[in-house]
Image (tube, coloured by chain):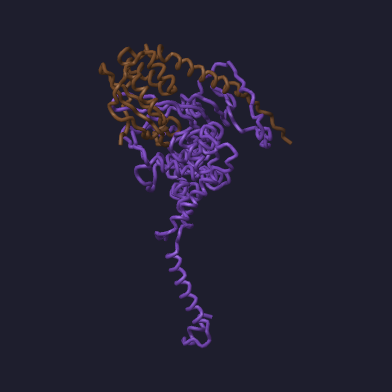
Amino acid sequence: MPVTSPHAEPTALQFQRRRVMALAARATLDELRGALAALEAPDAVDLRPIETGLVMLRGRTGGDGAPFNVGEATVTRATVRLPSGEVGFAYLLGRDAARARAAAILDAMAQRIGPKTIADGALAGVRDRLAAEDATAAARAAATKVDFFTMVRGED
Amino acid sequence: MYVAVKGGEKAIDNAHRLLASTRRGDPAVPAIGVDQIDGQLGIAVARVMAEGSLYDRRIAALAIKQARGDLIEAIFLVRAYRTTLPRFGYSQPLDTDAMFIARRISATYKDLPGGQVLGPTFDYTHRLIDFALETDADAPEAPAESNEQPAPAPHVTALLDGEGLIERNPAPAVDAVVGDLTREPLSFPADRDLRLQNLARGDEGFLLALGYSTQRGFGRTHPFVGEVRFGEVEVEFFAEELGFAVPLGRIEVTECEMVTQFRGGAGAPPQFTRGYGLVFGQSERKAMSMALVDRALRTREFGEDIDAPAQDEEFVLSHSDNVQATGFVEHLKLPHYVDFQAELGLIRTLRAEHAARRAPDAAEPAERREAAE
C-alpha cells in the first residue's frame, strides 16, 4: 500500500502536461476527437489494455489535517505509443474507454509538439467552454449570496 | 442459522421475471432514463454514491433504477459492483479549501470572507407540495446571475485558529499508514482515520439519529455549524509511471465543520474542539450528522466518559453500515427450517417437562413439588 506520494513540485513541462490532462479529463469524446483531428494525430498502439479500476479518494481530517479514506471512484486508464515513439498516458474519472484512449494520444502528442501548443490550440475550445461554465456556475452562486442582519431581541 | 436448501429454481426464475416486469411498471408509461435519474434525482444519486462508497454517478443512477428506488438495495448493488474492479491506488488528499463553491454557509459568523452563499437549497422553502411539477409546465425560470467577482472563501475554522481559539487539526504524520477498512477489517479501538472512513460510508438515517441524540443530551457537545460547503473539487492521482500527480477530473462533495465545546486543562488554555464531515455529492444532512458523531466519538482523546450510544465507537462503527445491517436483518427471511426444527424439538421437551412437573400424580419428591410452587 502506498503510504504517501511524493510531493515534489512539478517541472514546467509537467505543469503544462497536467494542464492538457486536466482539460482532457473534462472534455467530451467529440471534443477530444476534434482536437486529435485538428492535430492530424497519427494512429497509436495500445501499450497495455485500456482498463477501468478504482482509485480510493482521500480527504483530510478537518479539511487540512491527517488524511483519511472517503470512498472510491471509478477511473479509466490508457497507455499508447505513437509511431514516432512518444508514450502517452491518461487517467480519467469514469468508465469511458474511448475518452481515455483519445486523452492518452493527446498526451503523447503534447510530448511531441509541446503541451502548451495543445492546451491553447487544439484544446482552446474546451478551455473556453469550461471557463464559461465555471463562470456561469460562479455567477449563479454569487446571486444567492446573502447578508444576514441580527435583530435586537426584546427583553420582555 | 441459515442452512442451504435445494429446489425452487422454477419459482425463483419466475419471481425474478415478475420483479423485472413490476420494476418496469406500466409499459404505456415511458421508461425512466439513467440520465433522468442522474439529472433530476441528484440527491438520491449522491446518497447511493456516498454509502455505496463509489463515486460514479451513472452507476449509482443505474443502481437506483434497477433497485426500483430502494436506495439501500442500490447501495448494495454498487458495493457489489466495486468488488469487480482492480484498485489503482489512492488519490492525493482532496483540497476542499480550493473548492468551486456552489453553497457555503456559516452559523457562527454572519460576515465572513467569501460570504454566505445559499446555493441550491431546500432551506427557507415552505415545504408545500408544488402541483405545477405534476404537469408539463415544469420549466423553471433561468437562475439569476450576479457579476460580483468570487472572493476566496477560506475555511471558517481558520479564522478561529488564527486566534488560537480552536484546536488544530492533527498534522499528517510523515510515515503514517492511512487505515483502510476495505483492506483490513475494523478492530477496536479504532483511530480517527478509520472512524471517519466508516462514517463517510455509514447509513444517513443511523448517523442522523445518533447526531440528534447528542443534541438531546446523550453525549452533549454543544455544536455550532462553523461551516457547511458544497461544490466541486479536483481529484489528483500520483501515477508512478509518470512521476507526477495527474488531474482526473472533478467530483462534488459536501463538507461540514462543527465547532464544539471546549477542552483545556492545567497545561493548555480552553479551546473549541472540532467534528468533521465529508461526503460525496450534495448531502448536507449526512455531512452534518457525520461531524456530530465524529466529535462524539473523540471521547478517548479528551478523557470524556462514555455514557451515551453516540460516544461508544464499537456500537456506532459496528452498526453504521446499512449493507451489513440489511444483510443480517433480512437474512432472517431465508429458510431456517432445520434451525427451527431444533427449536420446535426443544420447546416440546420443555413443555413436556413443565407438564410433568404440574401433574399432581407426578412421581416427584414432595418437597421439590412444594419448592416449585
What residue appears at the point 36 percent right and 34 percent down from the top-left corner?
Answer: A53
Image x and y of residue B303, in percent: 44, 45
In this orientation, does residue B84 appear?
yes
User: With B207 as the anchor, is B188 left or right in this view?
Assistant: left
At 47% from the left and 70% from the top, the residue drawn is: B344
Instruction: Please tell me in which quadrant of the rendered image residue B172 appears.
Output: top left
* Quadrant placement of the C terminus of chain B: bottom right
| Quadrant of image for the N terminus of chain B | bottom left
Q: Position of residue A105 (x, y in %)?
A: 34, 20
On the image, the x and y values in percent for residue B71 come to 51, 43
The residue drawn where x is 57% and y is 16% is: B148
Residue nearer the viewer, B334 or A146: B334
User: Measured along the vertical axis of the image, is residue A77 above or below residue B320?
Assistant: above
User: Please, is residue A124 above or below residue A104 in the view?
Assistant: above
Q: Hue of chain B?
A: purple
Q: Colour of chain A?
A: brown
B240 over B200 or under it: above or below: above
- Give the residue drawn at x 48%, y 83%: B368
Q: Quadrant of residue B190?
A: top left
B62 or B363, which is in the foreground? Answer: B62
Residue B263 is at least partly visible in this image:
no
The residue at the far right in this view is A156
Give the number of marks. Answer: 0
Q: Nearer the viewer, residue A115 or B183?
A: A115
